[in-house]
Amino acid sequence: MPPRTPTPSICSRCLARARGFSTTVQARQQQKQHDLPPPPPRAGFTRLTNRGLISITGQDSTTFLQGLVTQNMLIPNDPNRATRRTACYAAFLNAQGRVLNDAFIYPSPGGGTSSADEAGWIVEVDKNEVSSLLKHLKKHKLRAKLKLRALEDGERTVWSSWDDENEPRWAAYNLESDSPSPFSQAPSIAGCIDPRAPGLGSRIVTPGPDDLRTHFPDESKLPGTEVALATYTLRRMLHGVAEGQGEIHRESALPLECNMDMMRGIDFRKGCYVGQELTIRTHHTGVVRKRILPVQLYNGDEQDAVPLAETPFYDPTTELPLPPSGANISRISARKGRSAGKFLAGIGNIGLALCRLEMMTDIALTGEGTQYAPGQEFKVSWDGTEGEPVQGPGEVKVKALIPPWTREFILAGIASKNPSRPDEAEGRRARDMVEMLEEEEEEVQQRRGE
């Protein structure tokens, strides 16, 4: 692979020296040290109280979901069209191909074992969106033989767990297996490896409100201790993963711009579903010019930037003001130009933003050239009327960063659509990785057929 020109970044010394903006509402605007979570531990688990669950049961539950979600609810290439037995990451779209909800879908624990009427699924979504998604599902139910129900608080609990020392390979569990859960043979527990980023962790759904240690007393299977929800959110943002409609804006975000193709949340070979047309056309013929990326927030005029890792540096002592969700990102220049992206959410001095790749990063999507300049800085400015809670005007500088797996995926897509381009070699490693995962899937399917 030819050497890549280092992308300028902001050094940790500059970030540590960063000082908050001075405004008349500075006390409300700035995040104090005690409000910020500590850096995430290398192993731990979190109760996801911000997620809600919907139960879909009945003999038509699988075909019903098959026509509504981006993921395949059947085993691929199975002539018998057997129902998948593993959980998955997916999205519900509207007719225009915009995201309604991002979701995890689990086989209903204990369902589908005795009769078709008991077959079912549990859909995990943003807790604030449960009622909206239920309305969407009921609108498409028609005469389908199924039951829809929002689970009550405490009926089941959603968890995220991780162990940086012993994480499975990225998306390895998205292969079909004989067990409905990789964590326990108990019929009451469901789960999957979180496929949205390498090493992000695991998703687990347990019965009742009990502590996760009740179900996994062996610390070798569940290392670490329970941490706050903010710590999980921080870790997710460090991986560049958006979640929920506070970050993936309902009926506005496109699934490919939210990296759902990279996160294996879309099956491009399945049949029709709501919103498929625009998604498939963009995948095969279009160019995804904007993607959600992790961003570094900072203040100051430091220009002695040095290359750093491709993920943000988190400083829990920062007093930077946090931009409101939806605030525009623009170049720091004398004249006002085209928007470079939108800030979505953040904690402390890191965040997530929808970034124009050819403006904020060194990735060239086409042979037409880019607007990227290595020394260019960007900022987020707001007048105090945007977002909630209402805050005073402010401004902070922002730097987009590209995790290595995101860069490799984008370069692989560029190379596959432009095989004669001279930069094809840059995407060879990423293509090899994708091909390896596909070969593993084929081997598993072959073993299942023997």
Image (spheres, rainbow, N blue to C red):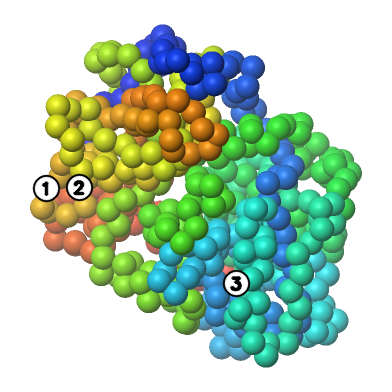
- Which type of secondary structure does the marked residue at label 1 adopt? loop
Residue 223 sits in quarter: top right
- Disc marking residue 369: 1
Are the two marked residues, 3 and 1, in contact with CB atoms closer than 8 angstroms?
no
Q: Position of residue 353 (x, y in %)?
A: 40, 41
Residue type highlighted by circle 3: His
Q: Which residue is mark 2?
A: 364
Q: Position of residue 367 (x, y in %)?
A: 12, 53
Of mark 2 and mark 1, the one earlier in the sequence is: 2
Residue 313 sits in quarter: top left
- Which type of secondary structure does the marked residue at label 3 adopt? helix
Q: Is residue 17 above or below residue 206?
A: above
Side (left or right) of 338 relative to 202 = left
Task: Say few, some or many: other residues with alpha carbon within 10 Å of mark 1 (under 14 / 14 to 19 / 20 or more).
Answer: few
Distance from Cα at disc 2 to Cα at disc 1: 7 Å
Distance from Cα at disc 3 to Cα at disc 1: 42 Å
Residue type highlighted by circle 1: Gly
- Disc marking residue 46: none
State the residue in front, 263 or 316. Answer: 316
Distance from Cα at disc 2 to Cα at disc 3: 38 Å
Are the two marked residues, 2 and 1, in contact with CB atoms closer than 8 angstroms?
yes
- Which type of secondary structure does the marked residue at label 2 adopt? loop
Q: Which residue is mark 3?
A: 136
Q: Is residue 380 above or below residue 258?
A: above
Give the quarter of the figure containing the C terminus.
bottom right
Which residue is rendered at x = 36% and y = 18% of the image? Answer: 299
Q: Position of residue 441 (x, y in %)?
A: 52, 67
Of mark 2 and mark 3, the one earlier in the sequence is: 3
State the residue in front, 173 or 203. Answer: 203
The residue mark sitting in front, 3 or 1, is 3
Which residue is rendered at x = 84% and y = 61% of the image? Answer: 188
